[in-house]
Image (cartoon, rainbow, N blue to C red):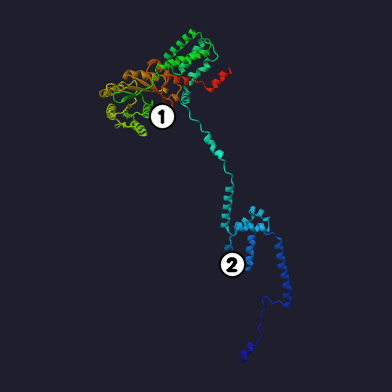
Amino acid sequence: MSKFFGWLKKDKPKSEPKNPPQSAPEEAQEIPQQIDEIIDEQGVEQERAPENVIETEVENASHAHPAVEVESAVDKQPLFDENSYTTDIDESTPALVTEVEDNDVSTSVITEEPGAVIEATTEMQETELELAPEPDAESKSEPESEKPAKIGLFAKLRQSLSRTKVNLGSGFVSLFRGKTIDDDLYEELETQLLVADVGIDTTSKIIKKLTDGAKRNQLKDGDALYQLLKQQMSDILQEVSQPLVPETDEGPFVILMVGVNGVGKTTTIGKMAKQFQSQGKKVMLAAGDTFRAAAVEQLQVWGERNNIPVIAQKTGSDSASVIYDALESAKARKVDVLIADTAGRLQNKEHLMEELKKVLRVMKKINPNAPHEVMLTLDAATGQNAVSQTKLFNQAVGLSGITLTKLDGTAKGGVIFALADQFNIPIRYIGVGEGIDDLRPFASDEFVEALFAESSADANAQSTQ
């Protein structure tokens, strides 16, 4: 026991304290130093211009309250309140307005509230859009005032004949103006007429009559010869200028349309039907072209568009039977005009021409005077081939009228003079465009005036001379 108590009484080594306590004099010396440092830091902060009022409020709150309370204070008061923010800046330091415009404040806010910056940027963009100048009302109305005026009928005809006029009509101006009448002038005129597809026979007649008239009237200059040529060509067309009058006292007035493929028969039928309907006539169509694919459907579309009945059978049916049924139906319904379509056929195919003769015989069983009009549709672009078509179709079925289409797209419009001179068959219509009104009743005086109408350049050249 004595040994045990002796061991307890032994001295143990004392461990030195990690941070020995400072004496009272040392603590008294450090307190004034800390106070001076705090005062110096506050003085520096007061001298420094505040870059952001919001950051200052957040820092002050962080010194006084825990971090959780700082976050709640930020959440309770929005960081980017434009009204309060601008007011604070205006009252405290006006110089900060420039810093706000330079996006210094928005840069510091990004670290705290990204969503607020996005909303602020969107509001700034909307403000810029609202301040953007609106286009003047006058500039909006300018396109409406620049709309071209509607072209008149004569101007439309003159424009459609622009290609034909290069060699005919006004195209003669440069040929005759300022020249004396001699053999060279007649030779140049003959060449130009042939280029325009007037044809050899008709050209020879024109040159002969022109030469005789110049000698008889003792003409000496080209301008006088030009006026004489215009009168002679007008006389040729005057004999065939006979508009179609679809009227009869016995049942419907029947028009049988014939021609080769691709000349525009079906389209011409649709336009004619619309014009007759606008005149107050009751019209019916017969889809006699049972050979060409979609020909029946094409005619039915024209009928549906204008509310005109169409008598049709399936493709491949007998064309004569279709037209026979259509004539009986038109007679029962007291229709004024019946227009019958037929399949396109070449004029040199005899068996096809015989089928056309069969259609005529079938129609005469119902009405001996039917058809009242056998109209040949010709494409002006075919030139002298149109003369051959007219000759053979006239021999087969006996033509009573001609429709010359596509005059607006060819320079071979001179073929109309050859047709009028050689066959003397009335020209009922001319096609000068794709519109319904572009199928126009033929009037020789109007046609010649449009053909010989001088352009503004020619008129100016004449005035200068």
Let me know if residue 183 appears in the view.
yes
Q: Are marks 2 and 1 in contact (CB under 8 Å)?
A: no
In the rendered image of this protein, does residue 130 appear above or below residue 335? Answer: below
Residue that carries the numbered disc 1 in the rendered image: 436
Let me know if residue 167 appears in the view.
no
Residue lying furthest bottom: 2
State the SS at label 2.
helix
- Give the amino acid at mark 2: Glu
Give how far across and how far down residue 308 sits, in percent.
34, 32
Figure quadrant of the C terminus? top right
Residue in front for this viewpoint, 15 or 56: 56
Q: Quadrant of residue 204?
A: top left
Q: Is residue 138 left or right of residue 271?
A: right
Q: In which quarter of the image is residue 64?
A: bottom right
State the SS at label 1.
helix
Q: Which of marks 2 and 1 is in front?
A: 1
Give how far across and how far down residue 260 sits, in percent.
36, 24
In the rendered image of this protein, does residue 252 appear above or below residue 175? Answer: below
Give the CA separation, mark 2 to mark 1.
85 Å
Residue that carries the numbered disc 2 in the rendered image: 69
The residue lying at 46 percent from left, 15 percent from top is 231
Residue in front for this viewpoint, 321 or 232: 232
Q: Is residue 171 left or right of residue 40?
A: left
